[in-house]
Image: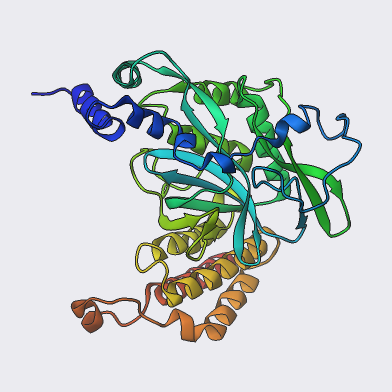
Amino acid sequence: MPTIKDTLQQELHAIFVSADNSAELTNQLDPKADDNQADQANVSAEVGEESVAAMSLPAVLPAVGEPSTNGVRAQLVVNKSDEFFIAIATKGVHSFVMLGNMHHGKPRILARVGKVAAQSSDSGCKIITKMVLLQTNAVLQEESIFPGGAISYAAYSINFQQYLQFTKAIGVAMGEESISCYQPLSEEIDSLTLQYRQIARVEKATEQDEHLIASTHGLSIANTCRHTAIDLIEYAQGNRLSANVSRVFFRNLPVKTTFDYGEPQDYFYVFPLPPGAYKVDGQKTAVLIKIYQRMENLLQKDPYGENTIAKFEILKSLYISQAGIAASGSLDDALANIRQWKDENQDVISQLRQQSFFGKIFTTQSGTQAMATEIEHDLLRMGAAISA
């Protein structure tokens, strides 16, 4: 009977190597072999590694929006009011992290990195054996900000300070490879000008930094590109990701779409900060968890249906409102908010989505409607308990 290690090795061999062709392994372990090389951003050599404050700028900067020779614009302007996001994504068996801002309803990717096996003289089979039994060397590398093809993902809202925290994480974790992304150049009242340049290296300072370095410099069954992508996001966000995101690299992430030159062909879902990000008491956190889980469960059926998208947007609005009330408002405020939300959005939340034959017979209200009623009852019970 084959051992667990034998089974894992066979599965990895089937994924990474076809007909014992090591070129297949190269394409899977190094996503740049699969992306359009002309899209790879290497303008960082023009700027150097200095920080914003210390770097010596060239005498003449390219105009804002002026494209570089590889398709990456040297500078971009973003509004401070824009929603920024960080996403874990998977293409094939490779997981990576991409960050950006929502621009005219579409994501605009500002940074993308992933962990790959370091270049080695070892054969493909030997690398796989090391991954299964021990660990092979790995590096963090810059990847194209114009991804294409079928990609599954989970995206989360962040603020610009968390975006900068991510660039710090890369500065801590990267090895000899240079990595570039959009970073602040100048600031106006309502906008930021970002420039594409190398991330400056940062000396490790904390135990979390040590963990991040260990995660990015090795590749094994227990420390895949998926594990490192999650570590990077949690470092930047300061919160653990939802259990909805699997650490198993060959499992798809919550939603899947096709990207064409960096733009998704479907609605792009960006979740708000998780409930753990808000320092509120357990009862109020329980309300946030119910709304958040409803948003997650919503995408398991007909993710790109009109009603699914509409429900997600109003649930996200409710969640943000309830998070603000949980931090500084009362239970009465929370109750008034959920009731107003139900009244204003009744047409959307009452709709049933893609019911089976028996579902149409036995289902009398939508899951979103049931959640709202349950939260309303919970808040009434909490209020009664406080008054007693």
Residue 296 versus residue 142 in the image, above or below: below
Left or right of residue 144, residue 204 in this image: right
Coordinates of residue 160 in the picture (x, y in percent)? 72, 48
| Colour treatment of the image | rainbow
Instruction: Quadrant for the C terminus, please.
Output: bottom right
Most foreground residue, 282 or 227: 227
Coordinates of residue 219 in the picture (x, y in percent)? 43, 23
Furthest residue toward top: 121
Quadrant of the rendered image containing residue 362: bottom left
Question: What residue do we see at 40% from left, 74% from top?
Answer: 370
Left or right of residue 14, residue 255 in this image: right
- The answer to whether residue 35 is visible is yes
Question: What residue do we see at 35% from left, 28% from top?
Answer: 23
Most foreground residue, 208 or 32: 32
- The answer to whether residue 239 is visible is no
Residue 179 versus residue 320 in the image, above or below: above
Coordinates of residue 14 in the picture (x, y in percent)? 24, 33
Residue 157 versus residue 166 in the image, above or below: below
Coordinates of residue 225 in the picture (x, y in percent)? 45, 33
Count the labels in the image: 0
Furthest residue toward right: 59
Question: What residue do we see at 46% from left, 36% from top?
Answer: 31
Instruction: Quadrant for the N terminus, please.
Output: top left
Quadrant of the rendered image containing residue 106: bottom right
Most foreground residue, 342 or 6: 6
Quadrant of the rendered image containing residue 210: top right
Question: What residue do we see at 33% from left, 17% from top?
Answer: 123
